[in-house]
Image (cartoon, grey):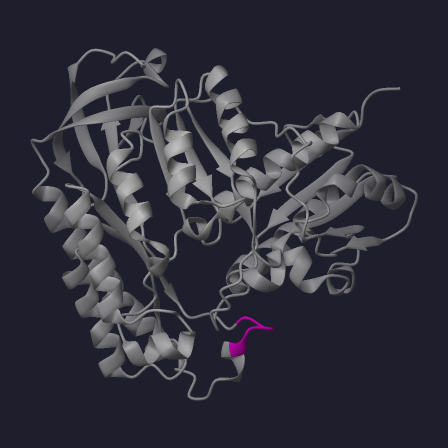
Amino acid sequence: MPARRVYLETYGCQMNVADSELIVGALGRAGYEPAASPEDADVLLVNTCAVRDNAEQRVIGRMGELQRFKRPGGVLGVVGCMAQRLGARLLEEVPRVDLVVGPDAYRNLPRLIALAADGERVTDTAFRAWEHYEDVPPVRPPGATQFVTVQRGCDYRCTFCIVPYTRGPERSRTLEDVVAEVRSLASGGATEVTLLGQTVNSWRADGNDFADLLRAVGTVDGIRRVRFTSPYPTDFTQRVIAAMAETEAVCEHVHLPAQSGSNRTLRRMLRRYTRERFLEVVGELRAAIPGITFSTDLIAGFPGETEADFAETLSLVQEAGFDDAYTFRYSVREGTPAVKLRDHVPEEVAAERLERLIAVVRTAARRRNLARVGTVHETLVERPSRRGGFLLGRTRGNHLVLLDLPASALGGYRQVRLTGTTGSTFTGEVVAPQLAVL
């Protein structure tokens, strides 16, 4: 009997990408094979995001499209954060969905798919505080850069955020397990790893903290670069900052979510820092790590945000000196405390503020990037660009560079001079041949 084939689509954050690799691994152990397209699949799965409403609406629309590929005896399933948030409601909203599975139940997928194939509509959204999938080998596409999940869940209940309700309480893998996985990746050719967690720098296990983890991962043979996302601003202890500065492999870039530049708004968000403390952290990191770059997350139109509050967010962009920002208009998330806040900002006001915020971020980023033109950076050649014939590389400071190189250069390191910028992406030329991987 031929193996059953699974088609999997992934939406959302890097954690979802890593979870999809676990799903493929769990199903592979049970004899399932990946399908390249929905037409070829017996099982159709969508790994989902629940952070914003438009992401969920997109998934619901996609499920409607995938329904037409469902075969007799086939299975159509929703997994991930949206599945966790909506649970059995998804079975009602999309009648041909057979399976709804949250992030802590992926090891049960073979059994649940079998039940669904027999005609039972099934859900599993139980939280399992012990679940780290240590015995489930992820199936990753080959490449020099890889994601490693070190922490699952979140204990910081920011009023706008659905993550604590879709991924459960925070728990950390042991240092030994993380290092063993990184060693395995290095032996397979990976030279860069990104450590993943919802508040990754709050990682703690068996008396070790995030500083210990950075030092341990950064000294694994073959690992040339270490990144991490997403940290929480006030979990940058002096120990963590020192480990970043002293561990050569740790890249000079931090994604540091601010969300707002207004203390009044930060209090309503239940963020555990003030504008002043956030800027102190930026200053401490800059003092310890010369040339460090910063990206951030910013929300426009949070409930109760006044024009004066928003102006403080605009000024934070300038004062912090962000190199890039992911900007969002506040999205109501059913089940989060922010839904109950008064004074929701009208949609048109929030949209107009978002446009202004994007303009300020882009202007500041372009100014900073123009100043980098002519400088030389170690660049990892990551992937083909959408622009024909070019490859995309990434500097240690997290800047993307278009390079005119052959496909054989993928996965290698080059010294690259930045020759121009579009404002966000650079063009570059190689000034040194392939660098040896230590």
Rendered-image quadrant of the C terminus: top left
**Image quadrant in which the N terminus is located:** top right
Residue under the point 86% across and 45% down: 116
Residue 75 vertical placement versus 167 (above, below): above
Q: Is residue 374 above or below residue 76?
A: above
Q: x and y percent of residue 16 in the render?
A: 55, 45
Q: Position of residue 215 (x, y in %)?
A: 37, 34
Q: Quadrant of residue 225?
A: top left
Residue placed most toward the observer, 234 or 239: 239
Residue 310, by quadrant, is bottom left
Q: Considering depth in this image, is 182 or 399 the residue closer to the camera?
A: 182
> Residue 163 magenta-drawn?
no
Q: Please report the bounds of the magenta region as a residue range.
A: 333-337
- Residue at image position (22%, 58%) is 361
Residue 229, above or below 386:
below
Q: Which residue is more in the foreground, 210 or 412? A: 210
State whether residue 385 appears in this view: no
Q: Position of residue 14 (x, y in %)?
A: 48, 43
Counting every numbered tag in the picture gives 0
Q: Nearer the viewer, residue 186 or 330?
A: 186
Residue 334 makes an appearance in the image: yes
Q: Describe residue 395's horizontal placement relative to residue 8 as left or right.
A: left
View extreme (front): residue: 207
Residue 12 placement, left or right of 139: left
View extreme (bottom): residue: 342
Residue 217, percent from left and from top = 42, 31
Q: Magenta-highlighted stretch: main secondary structure?
A: loop
